[in-house]
C-alpha cells in the first residue's frame, strides 16, 4: 500500500469516528466518496485490514511524527499556532487487554492460580469460586503494577478509568495552544505514572515543536510578520494534578510562568532549605489570584477537554484496538493530526467534521424544498387567477401565509402584519 493511501485511511478513521483498522477498511470499500478521497480506483478492491496493519509496521514512528509536524505547519501558515501559552492535561485510553489475563511478573502465575494458592494456605484444599472471591476481597493492594503484567500487552497498566472502573489502560497527554486550540504535542505513556512525571516529556516535545515552527517560518516567510511566538513557550496552564514544588521550580528556572492550582494540604508547609521552590510556589499562587489566571483556568477546561472529546470520544479512540505503545502512538499521531485538520477546516469553512457537513446538507436540502414548494404554489395560483378570478390579487398577498383568506374577500381585504 502506498504511504499516502495509508495516511488518508487513518484520517478517515478520525473523521468518521471509526475505532479499528478493520472498520476503516470496510468503510473505504463501502463509500465511493471515501474511495475517491483515499485514491482507490473503482476497478480495484479496497485494502484489507491486514494490509493496513502491515503498512503500519513497515512505516516507522518518525515518519508518523513528520506527518503530524507537517499538519502543524499548515496550521502555522494559517495563523492557528501561537506557541506562547500552552495547556497540558491527560486522559486514559482503555487497553486491548483483559484483567483476567494478567500474570505474576516473578513466576508467570495466573491470577486464579495465585488465589488458589492463597486459599490452600488458609486451609481450603479445594476452593470454589465463592471461596476465591472471599479470599481476594480481604486482600489489600491486589492490583499492583509492580507485581502483575499482561502477557499480551506489556505496556498496559492497571489503573482507574474516568468512570470509576479498574482496567488495563494507557495514558494520553496533550499539549494544546491556549490561543487557538491547536494540539502541539501528544504523548502516550504508562497509565500509572503521575502527572508531574509525564508532563516532562510532553512539555519538552511541545517546546521542540514550537522551536521547529519558528525555524520553518523564518525560512518560508522571512519578510512577513511572524505568527509563532519568537520567545517559544512562555506560559503553562494545567490542573492541580500537575502541582509540585520541584516541577514549579524547574519551570521557573527555565523562564516559564505557570498557572497551576494548588492541592489542599493539611497544616503548613516547611520551606527550610527550599527557598527557590518557595518563591516559585508563591509566584504561581499570586498569578492564579489575578484575573488573567482565572480566565486561563476556565479556558483550559474548555480547550483541552474539547480535544479529548474530538479525538477519543467522537473520534473513536477511547478504546484502543492495537497493542504496545509504538503501535498505538502511530495511530494516535495521525488521529490528532486529523483533529488539527478539523480545526483548520472550521477556520476556513466553518465546518470540520463529516457530521457537520451532513447537517449542512440536510439544512440546504430543507431550504431547497421550501423554495421549490413556494415557487410551485405561486405558479399554480397565478395560472388559476388568470382563468377564474374576477379581482386583482393584492401585492402583499402570499399563497402560504395568506392561504386562509378566500379570494372573494380580496376586495375588502385589509393588510395585516402577517400578510
Image (spheres, grey):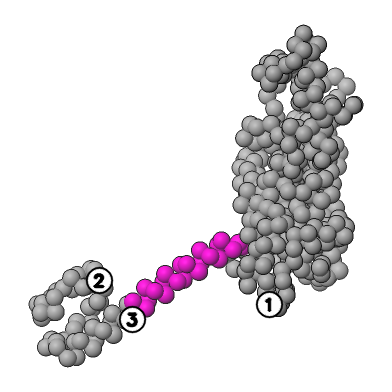
Return the disc, 2 or 3, that comes first in the chain's sequence.
3
Q: Residue at x 86, y 69 (%)?
A: 219
- Given residues 354 and 208, the one toward you in this image is 354
Quadrant holding the N terminus: bottom right
How many C-alpha atoms fall within 10 Å of the one at disc 3: few (<14), some, or many (≥20)? few
CA gap, disc 2 and disc 3: 14 Å
Look at discs 1 and 3 and give the one toward the viewer.
1
Q: Which residue is mark 3?
A: 375
Give above or below for 396 relative to 69.
below
Q: Residue at x 14, y 79 (%)?
A: 407
Q: Which residue is mark 2?
A: 401
Q: Which residue is mark 1?
A: 42
Return the disc, 2 or 1, that comes first in the chain's sequence.
1
- Given residues 138 and 227, the one toward you in this image is 138
The residue lying furthest to the right in this view is 106
Residue 52 appears in the rendering: yes
Relative side of 272 to 261, left or right: right
Segment colored magenta: 352-373
Amino acid at each position: 500500500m502506498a504511504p499516502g493511501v495509508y495516511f488518508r485511511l487513518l484520517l478517515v478513521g478520525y473523521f468518521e469516528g471509526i475505532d479499528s483498522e478493520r472498520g476503516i477498511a470496510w468503510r473505504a470499500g463501502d463509500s465511493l466518496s471515501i474511495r475517491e478521497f483515499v485514491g482507490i480506483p473503482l476497478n480495484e478492491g479496497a485494502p484489507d485490514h491486514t494490509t493496513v496493519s502491515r503498512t503500519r509496521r513497515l512505516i516507522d514512528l518518525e515518519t508518523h511524527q513528520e506527518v503530524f509536524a507537517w499538519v502543524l505547519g499548515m496550521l502555522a501558515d494559517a495563523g492557528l499556532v501561537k506557541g506562547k501559552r500552552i495547556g497540558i492535561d491527560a486522559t486514559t485510553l482503555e487497553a486491548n487487554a483483559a484483567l483476567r489475563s494478567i500474570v505474576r511478573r516473578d513466576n508467570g502465575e495466573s491470577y486464579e492460580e495465585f488465589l488458589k494458592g492463597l486459599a490452600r494456605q488458609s486451609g481450603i484444599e479445594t476452593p470454589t469460586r465463592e471461596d476465591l472471591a472471599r479470599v481476594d476481597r480481604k486482600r489489600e493492594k491486589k492490583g499492583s503494577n509492580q507485581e502483575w503484567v499482561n502477557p499480551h500487552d506489556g505496556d498496559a497498566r492497571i489503573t482507574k478509568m474516568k468512570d470509576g472502573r479498574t482496567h488495563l489502560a494507557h495514558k494520553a497527554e496533550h499539549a494544546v495552544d491556549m490561543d487557538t486550540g491547536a494540539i502541539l504535542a501528544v504523548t502516550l505513556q504508562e497509565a500509572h505514572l503521575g502527572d508531574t512525571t509525564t508532563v516532562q516529556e510532553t512539555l519538552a516535545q511541545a517546546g521542540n515543536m514550537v522551536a521547529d515552527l519558528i525555524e520553518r517560518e523564518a525560512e518560508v516567510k522571512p519578510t512577513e510578520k511572524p505568527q509563532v511566538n519568537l520567545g517559544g513557550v512562555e506560559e503553562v496552564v494545567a490542573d492541580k494534578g500537575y502541582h509540585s514544588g520541584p516541577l514549579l521550580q524547574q519551570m521557573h528556572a527555565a523562564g516559564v510562568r505557570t498557572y497551576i492550582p494548588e492541592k489542599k494540604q493539611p497544616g503548613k508547609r516547611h520551606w527550610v532549605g527550599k527557598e527557590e521552590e518557595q518563591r516559585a510556589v508563591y509566584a504561581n499562587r499570586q498569578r492564579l489570584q489575578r484575573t488573567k489566571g482565572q480566565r486561563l483556568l476556565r479556558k483550559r477546561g474548555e480547550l483541552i477537554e474539547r480535544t479529548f472529546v474530538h479525538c477519543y470520544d467522537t473520534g473513536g479512540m477511547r478504546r484502543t484496538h492495537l497493542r504496545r505503545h509504538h503501535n498505538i502512538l502511530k495511530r494516535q499521531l495521525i488521529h490528532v493530526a486529523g483533529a488539527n485538520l478539523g480545526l483548520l477546516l472550521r477556520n476556513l469553512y466553518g465546518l470540520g467534521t463529516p457530521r457537520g457537513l451532513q447537517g449542512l446538507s440536510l439544512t440546504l436540502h430543507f431550504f431547497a424544498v421550501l423554495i421549490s414548494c413556494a415557487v410551485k404554489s405561486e405558479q399554480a395560483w397565478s395560472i388559476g387567477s388568470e382563468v377564474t378570478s374576477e379581482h386583482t390579487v393584492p401585492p402583499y398577498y402570499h399563497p402560504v401565509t395568506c392561504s386562509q383568506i378566500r379570494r372573494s374577500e380580496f376586495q375588502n381585504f385589509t393588510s395585516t402584519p402577517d400578510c
